[in-house]
Image (cartoon, rainbow, N blue to C red):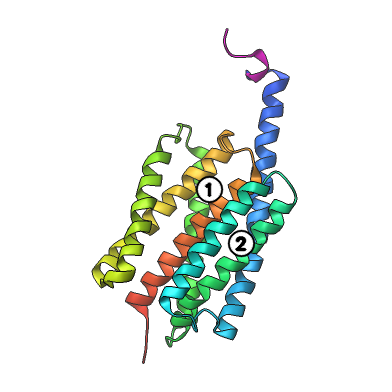
Amino acid sequence: MNQSLHTLPGFAGSGALAADRNRVLRNTYWLLALSLVPTVIGAWVGVATGITAAMSPGISLIVFLAGAFGLIYAIERTKNSSAGVAVLLGFTFFMGLMLSRLLATILGFKNGSSLIMTAFGGTAIIFFAMASLSTVIKRDLSGMGKFLFVGALIVFIGFLANFFLQSSALMLTLLVVCLGIFSAYMLYDLKRVIDGGETNYISATLAIYLDIYNVFQSLLALLGIFGGDRE
């Protein structure tokens, strides 16, 4: 037999394997919850100081791309040490700071606060729905990864192109597609942790955090476009 006995149900190894997966999932949820704190602080600092709103769109895009990809690289380099947690929390503060530009725009609406709470509630519902699905779906979802990656890459390129094109129709399309792709990515990333495909809780937290961030941002932008009240 090619499969080792200790990985089969009923043997001690299978219990240890399940315990490891549960530990990674538990640590991921814990760190994910913690990561929301610096995100909120970063968003508050950005809105209160107007630091991101003061940047030109071009400078803001450059800062975002350089900061996000630089910090993601640093997280991957330090994910096997305690420093990885600190870098991840620094990344989530930065992401909150960069989100403040959109938040400030939404808060400019009469119903801005309710739109933000609606987006937060909608994101929470999507997360809990995907988390529940990930525990009941038995089939292997690893094949979804390449399709989701290609979809996310196309959306990323689309947003970059629309920075220059400034097309409202393209923006709406990209926001809806982004919402769908990262909702599916949420299910995929959670299922990977549950199935043991991701064994590093810092990497797992980073992936799921980005899913949540993109879902919230897309949902908030769509609510602002369709539900913003300027009166």
Q: Give the image location of residue 5, x and y in percent.
A: 65, 13
Mark 1 residue element: helix
Please state which of residues 128 and 66 is positioned toward the viewer in this rendering: 66
Residue 198 lies left or right of residue 103; in this view the side is right
State which tag comes first along the sequence, 1 or 2: 2
Q: Give the image location of residue 122, x and y in percent.
A: 46, 64
Q: Residue at x 37, y 54 (%)?
A: 180
Mark 2 residue element: helix
Please state which of residues 133 and 226 is positioned toward the viewer in this rendering: 226
Query: Quick check: can you spot residue 75?
Result: yes
Please state which of residues 37 and 134 is positioned toward the viewer in this rendering: 37
Q: Give the image location of residue 213, x and y in percent.
A: 50, 61
- Which quadrant of the structure image shows residue 11? top right
According to the picture, the residue beneath numbered tag 2 turns out to be 91
Q: Give the image location of residue 201, x and y in percent.
A: 65, 45
Residues shaded magenta: 1-7
According to the picture, the residue beneath numbered tag 1 turns out to be 131
Residue 71 drawn in magenta: no
Instruction: State the separation of the CA atoms marked 1 and 2.
Output: 23 Å
Density class for disc 2 (Cα within 10 Å; few <14, some 14-19, many ≥20) is many
In the image, farthest residue toward the bottom: 231
* Tag 1: amino acid: Ala
Position of the C terminus, as image quadrant, is bottom left
As drawn, the label of residue 17 is none
Query: Quick check: can you spot residue 175?
Result: no
Q: Residue at x 44, y 69 (%)?
A: 61
* Tag 2: amino acid: Phe
Foreground label between 1 and 2: 2
Position of the N terminus, as image quadrant, is top right
